[in-house]
Image: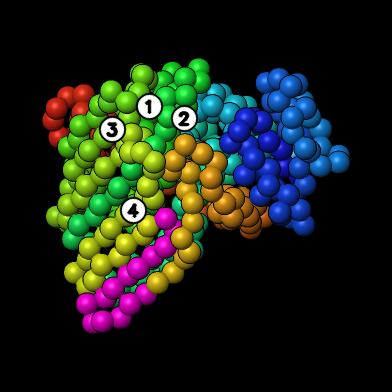
Amino acid sequence: MRVAVVGAGQASAPHLQSIADLHEEVVLACVVARSAGRLAALKLPAGTVPSTRLEDILEDATIAAVLVLTPPNTHLEIVEQLARAGKHVLVEKPLDVSLERAQQMVDICEQRGVKLAVMLQHRMRDASLALARLIKEGPLGDLLSASASIRWWRPQSYYDEPGRGTMARDGGGVLMTQAIHTLDLMLSLTGMPDKVMAMASTSAVHRMECEDTVAAALHYPNGAIGSIEATTTAWPGFPERIALNFTGGSATLEAGELLAELSGGRKMQAGVRQATGSGANIMAFDHTFHRAVLQDFVTAIRQDTEPAVSGRSALQVQQLIAAIMASSNSGAAVSLPP
């Protein structure tokens, strides 16, 4: 399958490595970037066309799928053009800077009959998949409580890059850029809450437009309650953690490892501990699960099935983030649709 990439910034590295790993399944036909300088810095395989024109992808009927790795505020317009050209799309998180634009993107792709997947790779970790199976099988029982802790660190130099942590380019701060991975994973395991009460602020640690510290309380339809702690002020950066309590046991995910303990005494462990980019080195993580999302995306195209991390499923985390910020801004609880 011939694929293309739009965007050649720092975040493109794990995507390009994933394509290289899957060389028996995909061929990198073209990479489009906004400047020739960025393209020149890449080590592209023989036969890959470097370009500064999106039209070179749109007009090539042999390209079946495109990875969109540009800043979030550009996603909708690029994906709309690709969808109209019949290209399947894998977009870097978030879908776009607002829930409204994200919904438009999902609708356009569905109307055009093209697959839309999102790089929310934490769902594809071995530990995450193992816990999802355990919850589905039923021995853990009903959810009682849930918590997500994302205590990361980013230096001021990170936010000094133009656009970082702004509404215009990123759509928000710690929630949309860092915590989104963990929150998406938690929602894939617990389902959506029906009510959110939250506070968000910008600490004295950073000079930035958007939030770097958030606390939220969640209420689920079955009466379970949850909590979220998210920040980029926690030096030197700590592994993200999800803890779930059920009527039949408990489960904890931390840095790619699962420990589940059932009330009957059975224990289950899965996954391996790994770096997650929680500190100043934002690229300090393995690309294995980027590759898993890409491979699943390719399989979904070939077999005409829904991608595991579909655009529609990724709307949930943006609904939650929008509700958290709305609650913080209003000082009141915000209800979420069922």
Front tag of 2 and 4: 4
Q: Is residue 98 visible?
A: no
Compare marks 3 and 4 and give the one earlier in the sequence: 3
> What kind of element bears circle 1?
loop
Chain-order first, disc 2 or disc 4: 2
Looking at the rendered structure, the kind of residue marked 4 is: Arg
Q: Residue at x 26, y 81 (%)?
A: 265
Q: Secondary structure at mark 2?
A: loop
Q: Which residues are magenta?
A: 255-268
Please provide percent x and percent y for residue 331: 14, 27
- In the image, 269 versus 274, the foreground residue is 274
Mark closest to the chain's N terminus, 1 or 2 = 2
Q: Which residue is mark 1?
A: 172
Residue 96's disc number: 2
Side of 221 where 181 appears, left or right: right
Relative to 285, 326 lies left or right: left
Marks 3 and 2 sit apart, C-alpha to C-alpha, by: 21 Å
Rounded to the nearest angstrom, the CA distance separating label 1 from label 4 is: 21 Å
Earlier along the polypeptide chain: callout 3 or callout 2? Answer: 2
Query: Which residue has dot 4 on it?
Result: 241
The image quadrant where one finds the C terminus is top left
The residue lying toward the viewer, choosing from 61 and 218, is 218
> Distance between the Cα atoms at labels 1 and 2?
11 Å
Mark 4 residue element:
strand
**Residue under pointer 3:** 213
**Residue 148 seen in the figure:** yes
